[in-house]
Image (spheres, rainbow, N blue to C red):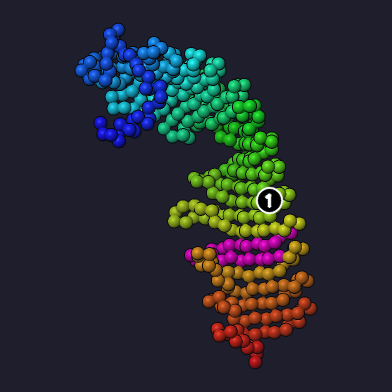
Amino acid sequence: MRPTLLATLLICVTPAAFAVQDCEFIGQSINTNNGAETAGKSGMVRCKDRDTGRMEREYELRNGSMFGLMRYYRDGKLNKEFTTTANGPREGLEREWAPNGQLIEEFTNVNGNTRGLRRSWYDDGSLKRVEWVADNERDGASVQFNRAKQVSELRCGPKPLLAPHADDAALCGFAGKPSTVSSYSSDGKLRSTQTLLAGTVQKAVRFANNGQPTDEEERSGTQRSERFFGDDGVKRREKLWDESSRPALLLRDAEYHASGTLVRERSYVVAESNGRKRSRLSTDARFFLNGQPQSKDSYTPEGNQEVRRTQRFLDNGKLRFEGSYLLEGNYRERPIGLHLSYFDNGKVQTEDRYDNKGNVQRQRTWDATGTLLSDDELFEDGSRKAVGK
């Protein structure tokens, strides 16, 4: 054996493994490190701690090779049992026991991977978890209980999978009517409440240690809404999704101040790009804390690019500025068309007209009474000329 491999094996061995063991095969002492003594033999080898006489492990020999049934003991009591194959992976039933002899876990290995029913228990024999393990996680299901026999976790499958060990038909709403299930922490605190129908969450609320909600989701038809809360339970964000396709597409994203006031709202439309649906930003609006609009950006396609039409407002809701920009990628944009700014009384203050290169071509200004003050044509070198002169 190479020195590096030996060192690796020594690191992985637990201190208990260094205890001297005496092994026997069919009642006769056997040196398991001597291949000549194990060659061609089939049956169970049993090894005990030399000092205490307690059983340490049992393993199966098949024609001199160590594979098949394996048992490990802790303080002389059976702790774990499984079966290995000739090429290494575990196969078939695997079980584990608590020091008091109570079975605490049982599942089946298929080519080294857990498949099918998997159960675990507390050391008092009460059910801790039952799970159906499938090739794909979405095809499986599980439910876990705390020591008070309250549900602590629930994951529903496409159909009832856990009976008779757990009634996931009733828990997951497969009985033709919605089911409401609350989940609790190990110390009995409420963690979530969810309503399910045919295995799909219709509404769910999750709670923090202080009892306030942390997040919430709700389905209506093909749409799903998500809400997120601060430590004080005040809603801080909300999202709306379209689940009629995969992946789900974002339709709305709203942000809220700590006071609960809406401060930003982005709306999306479903567009098709390269044969795939995607969410395209349609509007992006911001609000003052007094509820009045602060700004609004609207996005529309323009060939292979997008145009952003922007509006800015005073805190009394009156329009302060409006104009359009051609988005050129990499966060670059070019002003286009007519740009207007306004006085507090709503009258136009300045008017800038841009050419196709993003340069101001003509500029007009007024005073607050609406009297025209200037009307100039602007040139590339920065000079200007009054229109008509």
Residue furthest bottom as drawn: 389
Would residue 23 appear left or right of 235 to someone viewing this image?
A: left
Nearest to the observer: residue 10 or residue 92: 10
Q: Secondary structure at mark 1?
A: strand
Secondary structure mostly seen in magenta is: strand
Picture coordinates of residue 208 (x, y %)?
65, 37
Picture coordinates of residue 314 (x, y %)?
73, 65
Residue furthest front as drawn: 51
Residue at 64% of width from left, 48% of height from top? Answer: 237
Q: In which quadrant will I find the N terminus? A: top left
Is there any visible trace of residue 110 in the rendered image?
no
Tag 1: amino acid: Tyr
Q: In which quadrant will I find the C terminus? A: bottom right
Q: Which residues are magenta?
A: 291-313
Would residue 10 appear left or right of 31 to someone viewing this image?
A: right
Quarter of the figure with residue 144: top right
Residue at 39% of width from left, 18% of height from top? Answer: 72
Please tell me whether residue 378 is drawn above or below residue 137 in the rendered image. below
Would residue 207 appear left or right of 143 to someone viewing this image?
A: right
Please tell me whether residue 22 is drawn above or below residue 172 in the rendered image. above
Nearest to the observer: residue 313 or residue 119: 119
Looking at the rendered structure, the number of numbered marks drawn on it comes to 1
Q: What residue sits right under mark 1 in the picture?
A: 256
Would residue 322 appear left or right of 276 to someone viewing this image?
A: right
Residue at 62% of width from left, 62% of height from top? Answer: 297
Residue furthest top as drawn: 27
Nearest to the observer: residue 194 or residue 58: 58
